[in-house]
Amino acid sequence: PDNVSIHFTHGDIHRGSIMGSSGVDAPRILALIDWGQSGWYPEYWEHCKARHVGELKNEWKLLAVPHI
């Protein structure tokens, strides 16, 4: 749609571009790497792009994508 906000976004979030802490009690995202596809996109872009990464039913799609 044409009536959504535009935001600067990473453009390619997937498990390989997220650096996290190794703490089991409270893991945290430390950094996002690989900003080669970043740019100004519609507000829904990151969610739609993340849905198409990896296999259809994996941990990424079941646990992470709903929070993006």
Image (cartoon, rainbow, N blue to C red):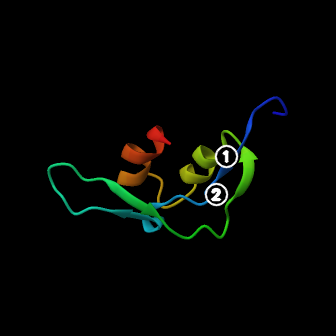
Q: Nearer the viewer, residue 35 or 62?
A: 35
Q: Amino acid at mark 2?
A: Gly
Residue 20 can be seen in this image:
yes
Location of mark 1 (residue): 45
For residue 6, side relative to residue 9 (left or right): right
Q: Which residue is situated farthest in the left direction here?
A: 25
Residue 58 can be seen in this image:
no
Q: Quadrant of residue 7?
A: top right
Q: How many marks?
A: 2
User: Residue visible at 22% across and 63% down?
Assistant: 22
Few, some or many C-alpha atoms within 10 Å of disc 1 (few <14, some 14-19, many ≥20)?
some
Estimate the x, y position of residue 34 in percent, counting from the top left: 56, 70
Q: Amino acid at mark 1?
A: Trp
Q: Quadrant of residue 43?
A: top right
For residue 11, side relative to residue 42 (left or right): left
User: Disc 2 versus disc 1: distance between alpha carbons?
Assistant: 7 Å
Which element carries disc 1, helix, strand or loop?
helix
Q: Earlier in the sequence, mark 2 or mark 1?
A: 2
Which element carries disc 2, helix, strand or loop?
loop
Q: Nearer the viewer, residue 40 or 67?
A: 40
Estimate the x, y position of residue 68 in percent, counting from the top left: 50, 42
For residue 46, side relative to residue 63 (left or right): right
Contact between labelled residues 1 and 2, with CB atoms less than 8 Å apart = yes
User: Residue visible at 55% across and 49% down?
Assistant: 51
User: Residue visible at 64% across and 57% down?
Assistant: 11
Q: Relative to 43, does residue 49 appear above or below in the rendering? A: below
Location of mark 2 (residue): 11
Estimate the x, y position of residue 44 in percent, counting from the top left: 66, 40
Give the label on residue 53, or none.
none
Q: Which residue is situated farthest in the right direction here?
A: 2
User: Residue visible at 35% across and 52% down?
Assistant: 59
Q: Nearer the viewer, residue 53 or 15?
A: 15
